[in-house]
Structure formats: structure tokens, C-alpha cells
Image (cartoon, rainbow, N blue to C red):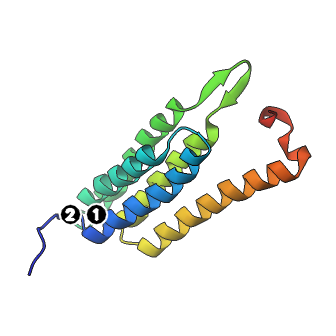
């Protein structure tokens, strides 16, 4: 029995993109930050889709240019979550998360599923680990990270 043809996407790619976006987004939503579960899943799926359109179907140069265009577009999306308020800049981590989601989507499109999952897990480990360190070591809360 053959599944419905969803080329250039794959069921595995969609599942990995959903999973990676979900675990990163879950951490962000859990602590009340922008780019929560929905946004994270959608960014990862969108980048996976855009890059899959070109990968393996046209010359490599075009696929590389498409990835460059995705990177540029994601930069604008990330810039939209950065807010300047009372002399402080907020949202830089959320913007960085959007970059990680885009990189993850690219890895999935190039069928590097294990690398994508590893990157997502490392991302969550960094977010949770640094938050733990900031709560444990008072000096890490200096500067713009003050409560």
C-alpha cells in the first residue's frame, strides 16, 4: 500500500520538523517567551518546505541560493521579535531561537534528521541550563538580565 505522494516533502521530514519545533517551542512557551510552540513548529516546517522544494531537484547552486534567501528572511522575522524598551533590548534570545529553527529546518530538508534532532536537544539544553545557572549564580543576573 502506497502513501499519498507528498513530494518534495516526506512523512519522516514532517515528523522531525514538527518534533524539533515542538521541543524548542515548548521550552519558550513554558517560560512565557515569544516564539512559543506554534511559532517554532511553523518556522521549522516552513524552512523545511522551502529548502525541500529546491534540494535534489535543481542544480546545487540554486539550492544554495534558496538557503541564503531563507536565512535573509528569517533574519527579518527574528528582528521583529527584538524590542527596545527603557534602554534595554529584549527578545534577542527569541530571535536566536528563530535562527536555530531555520537551521534545523535546513538540516531536515537535506535529510540530516539525527543532526536536526541533536541541534534541537542542544538548543533546549542551553536554554534550560543557562536559566538554571542564572538562578543559581547571582552574578550571572547582572546587566540587562536583572529582575
Residue 123 falls left or right of residue 71: right
Badge 1 element: loop
Vertical arrangement, residue 33 with respect to residue 124, above or below: above
- Residue at point 34%, 54% (across, down): 45
- Residue at point 65%, 31% (across, down): 90
In which quadrant is the C terminus drawn?
Answer: top right
In which quadrant is the N terminus drawn?
Answer: bottom left
**Quarter occupied by residue 109:** bottom left
Q: Position of residue 13 (x, y in %)?
A: 32, 67
Q: Position of residue 54 (x, y in %)?
A: 25, 58
Instruction: Give the mark nearest the N terminus, 2 or 1.
Output: 2
Residue 4 falls left or right of residue 48: left
Can residue 74 be seen by looking at this rendering? Answer: yes
- Residue at point 72%, 18% (across, down): 86
Mark 1 lies on residue: 55
Badge 2 element: loop
Q: What's the CA distance linking mark 2 and mark 1?
A: 9 Å
Q: Position of residue 120 (x, y in %)?
A: 53, 62
**Quarter occupied by residue 6:** bottom left
> Looking at the image, which residue sits at the far top?
86
Q: Nearer the viewer, residue 1 or 46?
A: 1
- Residue at point 38%, 59% (across, down): 18
Pointers 2 and 1 in contact (CB under 8 A)?
yes
Structural crowding at the residue carrying mark 2, measured as other residues with C-alpha within 10 Å and reported as few (<14), some (14–19) or many (≥20): some
> Looking at the image, which residue sits at the far bottom?
1
Q: Position of residue 104 (x, y in %)?
A: 46, 60
Mark 2 lies on residue: 8
Q: Nearer the viewer, mark 2 or mark 1?
A: 2
**Quarter occupied by residue 84:** top right
Amino acid at each position: 500500500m502506497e502513501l499519498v505522494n507528498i513530494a518534495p516533502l516526506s512523512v519522516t521530514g514532517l515528523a522531525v520538523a514538527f518534533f524539533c519545533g515542538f521541543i524548542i517551542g515548548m521550552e519558550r512557551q513554558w517560560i512565557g517567551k515569544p516564539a512559543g510552540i506554534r511559532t517554532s513548529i511553523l518556522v521549522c516546517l516552513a524552512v523545511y518546505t522551502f529548502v525541500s522544494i529546491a534540494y535534489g531537484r535543481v542544480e546545487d547552486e540554486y539550492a544554495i541560493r534558496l538557503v541564503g534567501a531563507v536565512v535573509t528572511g528569517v533574519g527579518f522575522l527574528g528582528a521583529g521579535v527584538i524590542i527596545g524598551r527603557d534602554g534595554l533590548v529584549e527578545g534577542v534570545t527569541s530571535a536566536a531561537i528563530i535562527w536555530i529553527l531555520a537551521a534545523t529546518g535546513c538540516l531536515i530538508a537535506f535529510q540530516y534528521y539525527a543532526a536536526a534532532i541533536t541541534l534541537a536537544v542542544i538548543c533546549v539544553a542551553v536554554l534550560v541550563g543557562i536559566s538554571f545557572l542564572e538562578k543559581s549564580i547571582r552574578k550571572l543576573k547582572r546587566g540587562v538580565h536583572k529582575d
